[in-house]
Image (cartoon, helix red, strand yellow):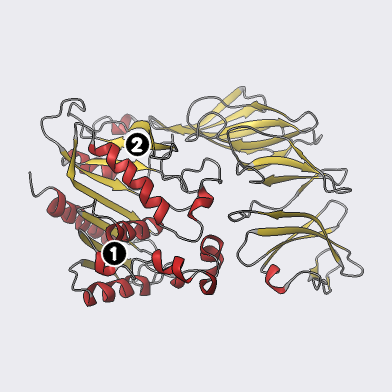
Amino acid sequence: LLDVPTGSARQVDLSSFPENDRLIARVSWSPSNELWLQVFNRIQNQQSLLRVDRQSGTATSLLTEVSAGWIEVLGTPRFLPNGDFLWLSDLPEGRRHLYRVSVATGQQTQLTSGNWDVDSLLSVSQDSATAFVSGNISKPTETQLIAVDIQHATVHPITSQAGTHRASIDASGKYFIDTFSNLTTPPTTSLHAIDGQLIRVISAGTSDRYEYVDVRSPLSTTITTRDGVELQMQVLLPPHIDPAAPAKKLPVLFYVYGGPQAPTVQNAWPSGNYWWHQMLCQQGFAVVMCDNRSARGRGIKDTWTVRGDLGRVELRDLEDAAKWVSQQPWADANRLGIWGWSYGGYFTAYALTHSKLFRAGIAGAPVTDWRNYDAIYTERYMDLPQKNLEGYKSSSPVEAAANLSGRLMLIHGERDDNVHISNTLQLAASLQNAGKQFDLMIYPSNRHGITDPQQRFHMHQLMTEFLMRQLKADD
């Protein structure tokens, strides 16, 4: 290990920790130049925080966390002047909160609590009396800036306007810059005093340029799964239909991501594929987003239920969402489609090989077998392949290719260095061997995203024509 303050290299003695408990190390320095290491085991359900004697290289553990699922990497200790530090943790209850940890004893004092989650620790005031965090204290789909009294363990939201606040605190702790938006308000960046008082607007987005576009704002709602878990949902409908009494039922396209702690439903100004989805609505589609329990970003306890068998719990929640949608007056239950990219591509391929609900699906850059993907990501959720052979098999669309139901389109960038194109080629080979017809498009010279403007236009045109063929031909 390179000792940064002295510029010398020295060896840290980790011999007291089992070899498989030394996969990842994160390094931090206290204000007094003490060296600290975070050490994770390979499957990332245990971490230890070690204090290292810089003279002898001996490491001693101050804090150890063991999870029933896995441990997210939430940053390094934020040290206070007396040597104690602030620490983010999902344990013990599966809700992410802020703790103060005594360096002398390792005792943890919980500073935030309740049925909400701290997203990140942003800053600490110069007098070390207040920590500033972001979190979903108001609603699961919103983010607010919150002040935490470190001595008294009390919280005070600084922002309150419904939506998403992305705050940056200045070095003095007296001011912050807030970038705010919600579903109907474009991003506005403004300068505030730390008590929330507005000083000036730096830049204000405007929706005037969209007034000529014939669109309807998303409908936000929640549904309840068969086992009582509440999921957030957004629905896009054509601009001129009456949802309660439409002239005809609509084909429905589900847009999914579904990966752990990665929600798609947020009260923020829409971006990405939103305008393509709105164009589909103008063509007579309904578009639905519903975050399954592992993706919804509301506590990690429910997310742990996917460990060892990705796809199964996510699909069950999606089936419950599809059941709710199918009961709506505007939805045609016989014309359901699904699409997604990356984990969403995996989810799409999994759904079409493990369910008969969907008439068509578009899987962009999908993982098709988790034995193909990054160890540091996969082993956190799936354990080691040799210890979970059945889980790797049951979660694989390649293994289930013979069960394909509905028409599947596969799309991949030829130079994808995240989800390698071999994933799509393996699934294509298995589908061919099973006698299953499907569609395939490769975009040369693109990586994980299709970024070349002409090729991206080509891709959206391709996907639109595919959906019109598969879901709108009955009109």
- Can you say whether 16 is above or below 290 in the image? below
243 left or right, relative to 383:
left
What amino acid is at disc 1?
A: Ile
In terms of sequence position, does the residue under pointer 2 or pointer 1 come before the other? 2
Image quarter hosting the N terminus: bottom right
Q: Residues within 10 Å of mark 2 (few under 14, many from 20)?
A: some
- Residue 475 shows up from this direction: yes
Q: Where is residue 73 in the image (x, y as percent from the top left)?
A: 63, 55
Residue extending furthest toward the top? 197
222 left or right, relative to 74:
left
Q: Where is residue 474 in the image (x, y as percent from the top left)?
A: 8, 47
Q: Is mark 2 on a helix, strand or loop?
A: strand
- Count numbered badges in the picture: 2
Q: Which residue is drawn at 66% across and 46% down?
A: 91
Q: Which residue is drawn at 55% across and 65% down?
A: 383
Q: Distance between the residues labelled 2 and 1?
A: 25 Å
What amino acid is at disc 2?
A: Gln
Q: Position of residue 121 (x, y in %)?
A: 66, 42
Mark 2 vs mark 1: give the one in front.
2
Residue extending furthest toward the right? 55
Residue that mark 2 sits on: 234
Which image quadrant is residue 349 in? bottom left
**Residue sitting nearer the eye, 93 or 347:** 93
Residue that mark 1 sits on: 411
Q: Position of residue 15 (x, y in %)?
A: 80, 73
Q: Which residue is drawn at 42% across and 67% down?
A: 419
